Image (cartoon, rainbow, N blue to C red):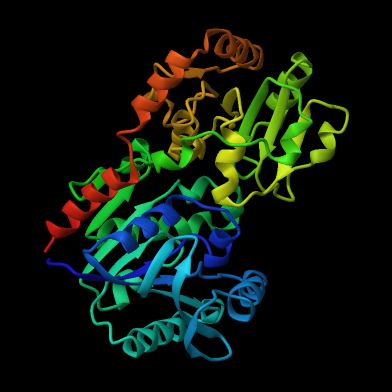
C-alpha cells in the first residue's frame, strides 16, 4: 500500500475538546499524521454520540459552535469543515473536521452520511483509523483500503460505559476479526485481541522539546508554598481520592497541586479543610509546561483496578521530560522506567516515596530522566505505525 494516504479517523474526543486543552493519544497521533508527507488528507470525525443526551451536547459543541474554518457541507445534523490552523498546527487543505448526531438515530442513516461526506471530498477507499469500539459498522460496511483500530484503554472497565459492557464485548470481537492492524497503548491490551500477529503494542510518546526551557511562575502558582507535589490531567474517578486525602494530611508542609478539569463525580469539597491541596482547573495544553516544570515531584495516584491495567499514562512521559521524579501506584506502564518511577502500593508507602523522591533529587538525576524518555518520541511511534501500514499493502 503506497502513500499518500487519505484517512478517515473516528476520534475518541471532539475537536473542540482538543482546542480547549484536553489532549490525549488520539490528538498526538493525528497531529503527527498531519505533519507526515505520507498523508494527503484526514477526515477527523468528532466523537460519535450514542445517546440523545450526548447527541444534544455534541450538537451544541460541534454543530452550533464547532471547528472554525471553511464550511464544506452542513445540514441540520451534519457539519464538515476544512480547518487549516488549529492547536494541531498548520495543515492547509489537509484536515477536515466532521461532526454528526445521526449516530443517535440509526446506523444506516449515519452510514449514508459518511458516504455522502466522502463523495463530497472525492475520497475513495480511505484508511479507516478508529479509536471508538462502540461503533463497529465502519469496519464492516465502509469501503476502505485498510482498517486500523488503536486501543486506548479497555472501555469495558471504564465507569462511563458500565451500561455498555455487553455491547463492548461484542464490539471488540468484531474489531478483533475485521481490523487489518491493531495498535494497543498497553502491553496487556494485546490479550484483548488474542495477541494475534496483526496486534502491536505501541505505547504513548512525548513531544520532548515542548517540556524543555525555563518558565515564569503563573499567577495561580505564585502563592503556593513549595515543595509542589503535582498532578496534571483530568481529575476523574480513576484517581484514588482517599490516597490523596491521606497523603495531604500526612504532609502538611507540602503543597499538592492538581492541574486539569475536575469531573462532576469528584467532590472537591472533601478537601475544603486541606489548605495544602490546590485545584487550579483546566489549562490550555500549550501552558502546561509553565506549571509542570515548577513541580518538585510528579504523582500518578490512580486506583489499581482492571481499567488502570490497560493504561499507559501520557503524564508519565511528560513528567520525565520535565526531569521530575515520579511517584505512582502500581498501574500499567510504570515498568517501562523502573529506575525513574517510585511505585507504592499502600498509602503510607506512597507518602514515604514522595519524601525519598525529594531527598534524592538532583540536577544529575533530572538530566538522566530526560535522557531516558527522549527516545520515546511521537515521531518514533509514528515511524513504526507507518512502516506497518506500508507493509500491509
Q: Position of residue 99 (x, y in %)?
A: 51, 77
The x and y percentages for residue 105 are 55, 81
Which of the 4 image quarters holds residue 352? top right
Identified at 79% across, 31% down, the residue is: 223
User: 34 or 157: which is nearer to us?
Assistant: 34
Residue nearer the viewer, 278 or 198? 278
Q: Residue at x 62, y 77 (%)?
A: 59
Left or right: 365, with 255 as reference point: left
Q: Is residue 206 left or right of residue 327?
A: left
Q: Looking at the picture, does residue 220 appear above or below residue 74?
A: above
Residue 120: give x, y in percent of width and height.
35, 90
Left or right: 328 in relation to 244: left
Q: Residue at x 22, y 60 (%)?
A: 180
The quadrant of the image that shows the C terminus is bottom left
Residue at the location (45% across, 47% down)?
Answer: 154
Please say whether residue 194 is visible from this viewpoint.
no
Comparing 42 with 53, the one in front is 42
Q: Is residue 294 visible?
A: yes
Q: Quadrant of the N terminus?
A: bottom left
In the rendered view, would you say 23 is above or below 298?
below
Residue 366 screen position, x and y as percent: 45, 20
Q: Count numbered badges in the picture.
A: 0
Left or right of 164? Residue 142 is left
Work out whether 282 lies above or below 270.
below
Amino acid at each position: 500500500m503506497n502513500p499518500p494516504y487519505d484517512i478517515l479517523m473516528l476520534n475518541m474526543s471532539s475537536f473542540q475538546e482538543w482546542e480547549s486543552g484536553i489532549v490525549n493519544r488520539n490528538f498526538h497521533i493525528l497531529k503527527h499524521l498531519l505533519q507526515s508527507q505520507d498523508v494527503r488528507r484526514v477526515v477527523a470525525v468528532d466523537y460519535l454520540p450514542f445517546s440523545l443526551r450526548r447527541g444534544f451536547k455534541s450538537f451544541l459543541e460541534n454543530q452550533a459552535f464547532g471547528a472554525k474554518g471553511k464550511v464544506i457541507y452542513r445540514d441540520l445534523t451534519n457539519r464538515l469543515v476544512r480547518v487549516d490552523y488549529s492547536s494541531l498546527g498548520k495543515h492547509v487543505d489537509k484536515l477536515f473536521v466532521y461532526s454528526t448526531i445521526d449516530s443517535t438515530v440509526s446506523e444506516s442513516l449515519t452510514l449514508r452520511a459518511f458516504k455522502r461526506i466522502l463523495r463530497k471530498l472525492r475520497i475513495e477507499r480511505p484508511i479507516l483509523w478508529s479509536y471508538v469500539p462502540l461503533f463497529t459498522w465502519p469496519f464492516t460496511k465502509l469501503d476502505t483500503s485498510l482498517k486500523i483500530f488503536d486501543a486506548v484503554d479497555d472501555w469495558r472497565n471504564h465507569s462511563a460505559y458500565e451500561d455498555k459492557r455487553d455491547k463492548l464485548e461484542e464490539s471488540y470481537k468484531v474489531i478483533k476479526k475485521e481490523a487489518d492492524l491493531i495498535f494497543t497503548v498497553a502491553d496487556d491490551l494485546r490479550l484483548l485481541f488474542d495477541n494475534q500477529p496483526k496486534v502491536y503494542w505501541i505505547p504513548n510518546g512525548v513531544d520532548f522539546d515542548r517540556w524543555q526551557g525555563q518558565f515564569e511562575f503563573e499567577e495561580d502558582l505564585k502563592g503556593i508554598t513549595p515543595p509542589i507535589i503535582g498532578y496534571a490531567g483530568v481529575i476523574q474517578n480513576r484517581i484514588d481520592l482517599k490516597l490523596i486525602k491521606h497523603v495531604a494530611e500526612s504532609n502538611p508542609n507540602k503543597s499538592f497541586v492538581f492541574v486539569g478539569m475536575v469531573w462532576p463525580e469528584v467532590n472537591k469539597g472533601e478537601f475544603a479543610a486541606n489548605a495544602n491541596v490546590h485545584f487550579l482547573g483546566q489549562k490550555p495544553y500549550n501552558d502546561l509546561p509553565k506549571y509542570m516544570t515548577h513541580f518538585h515531584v510528579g504523582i500518578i495516584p490512580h486506583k489499581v483496578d482492571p481499567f488502570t491495567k490497560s493504561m499507559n499514562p501520557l503524564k508519565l512521559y511528560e513528567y520525565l521530560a520535565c526531569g521530575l521524579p515520579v511517584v505512582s501506584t502500581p498501574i500499567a506502564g510504570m515498568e517501562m522506567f523502573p529506575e525513574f518511577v517510585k511505585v507504592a502500593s499502600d498509602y503510607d508507602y506512597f507518602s514515604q516515596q514522595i519524601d525519598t523522591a525529594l531527598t534524592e533529587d538532583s540536577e544529575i538525576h533530572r538530566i538522566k530522566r530526560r535522557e531516558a524518555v527522549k527516545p520515546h518520541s511521537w515521531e518514533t511511534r509514528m515511524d513504526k505505525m507507518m512502516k506497518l501500514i506500508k507493509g500491509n499493502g
